[in-house]
Amino acid sequence: MLDKPYRTPPWIHKTLIPLFFLLLCPPTVFVFWYTCTYLNGSLLTFWEIASRNGGLVSATLSIWKPLFFGSKTSWYILTSFALFQLFLMKAVPGKLFYGPITPQGNTPVYKANGIACFLITLATFFLSASVFHLFPATILYDNLGPLLGALNCFSLVFCLFLYLKGIFFPSSSDSGASGNPLFDYYWGTELYPRVLCWDIKMFTNCRFGMMSWPLLILSYGAKQAELYGLSDSMMVAIALQLLYVGKFFLWETGYLRSLDIMHDRAGFYICWGCLVWVPCIYTSPALYLVNHPNDLGIFWSSLIFLAGAFSIGVNFLADKQRQLARATNGKHLVWKKTPTLIEASFQTENGETQKTLLLASGWWGLARHFHYIPELLGAFFWSLPALFLNFLPYFYVLFLAILLVDRAFRHDRRCKEKYGKSWDEYCEKVPYKMIPFIF
């Protein structure tokens, strides 16, 4: 999905692009689920079936229609999970921390308890399924189609609620409508909506989207174990994804200061994406593996896991490096050297002058967005156990590559507008966007 472009006619980014994604993304989710579950993961097979049965639209609707409203079980699962995560957000102790100041001069406040909530969620799922036998561990896989149907229905209505909330009862002054209802529904009308003291974007992005990811892949692993026995390929894929999601929650405070949170409003683009797209597409490599129990052997399993773990580790260290440099005002050594920093000032929409530090050494001296490379590699390595029989398990890697490249360009444009000459100075010191000496 694309952010608001800068040089295209308004009707393209305010009408055509939102309409394209609103029409394309929901049916894509159901095609992916159906293809993985019933067509051996072959998109070519789906194409052939669609060609014989009235075309892509007709075939997609035939899959989607019986799942459109979900099922009683799926709504029970989703409601229980959502309420549990809302409870954990408030009940689990954590230090308060402050997000970046907004264009209108507001400062969002959060509770840093992500890693504790992550561990509690995993433990609760394990104990409920394996010790107390309240439900089978395969429950999420067995109900995935109806779950996606229920999630999609809820999310579309929820995004309408957020659209209206931002217009009629916003949580802060960082809100407003553009005058185009289609674009406002897609993009959102509030930057930091809150409902009964719960931060909406923290819930949808972190505590629902990202927290559902590990539970889904564990359920996929349980299903493969039930059908074929647990393969080493599935174990590698699950282990790397658990490591990545654990890393995310360890760094959650950094994410809440990222481009997604600072600039993307709470609408279909980000909220539907986290509530529906993430649970389906981000977990698709492991979903594909359920019926493809590849035997990698100790050597290849170990090699893939170590390469993936190294990539995830580098991604974490790069984010942490910048975070520490800013938190300590440049007094923290970077690669055992005094960091190269550029002080940049910017103004909020209220006219207040703020300052920040741009790190131009360490990982951030290699390229302005070098941390995207190990993130892509991590996704590639947890998809690699699926081998190369079909393209579907690599769709997420392709999607992520497009997303991150687009984000790199968007981030550079925003920083140029925000920091001016300081950003030009930074680009002179760090001339490469993502890949050192290449791009």
Image (cartoon, helix red, strand yellow):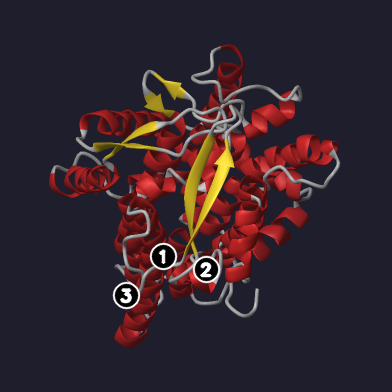
Give the labeled residue for mark 1.
318
Image point 46% across, 47% down: which residue?
279
- Where is residue 167? Give x, y as percent: 62, 16
Quadrant hosting residue 12:
top right
Quadrant (top left, top right, bottom left, bottom right) of the C terminus: bottom right
Task: Give the mark, 2 or 3, whose residue is nearer the N terminus.
Answer: 3
Give the labeled residue for mark 2.
370
Residue 262 relative to residue 189: left or right:
left
Judge whether residue 194 can be spotted in this image. Answer: yes
Circle number at residue 336: 3
Q: Is residue 93 above or below residue 161?
A: below
Task: Give the mark, 3 or 1, whose residue is nearer the N terminus.
Answer: 1
Alpha carbons under labels 2 and 1: distance apart: 8 Å
In the image, 217 versus 143, the foreground residue is 217
Could you tell me which secondary element the residue under label 3 belongs to?
loop
Quadrant hosting residue 299:
bottom left
Alpha carbons under labels 3 and 1: distance apart: 14 Å
**Label 1 is placed on what type of residue?**
Ala
**Label 3 is placed on what type of residue?**
Lys
Residue 60 relative to residue 52: left or right:
left
- Where is residue 154? Give x, y as percent: 51, 28
Specify few, some or many for label 3: CA neighbours under 10 Å numbering under 14, 14-19, or 20 or more.
Answer: few
Disc number lying in front (2 or 3): 3
Q: Residue furthest bottom?
A: 299
Q: Is residue 285 above or below residue 407?
A: below
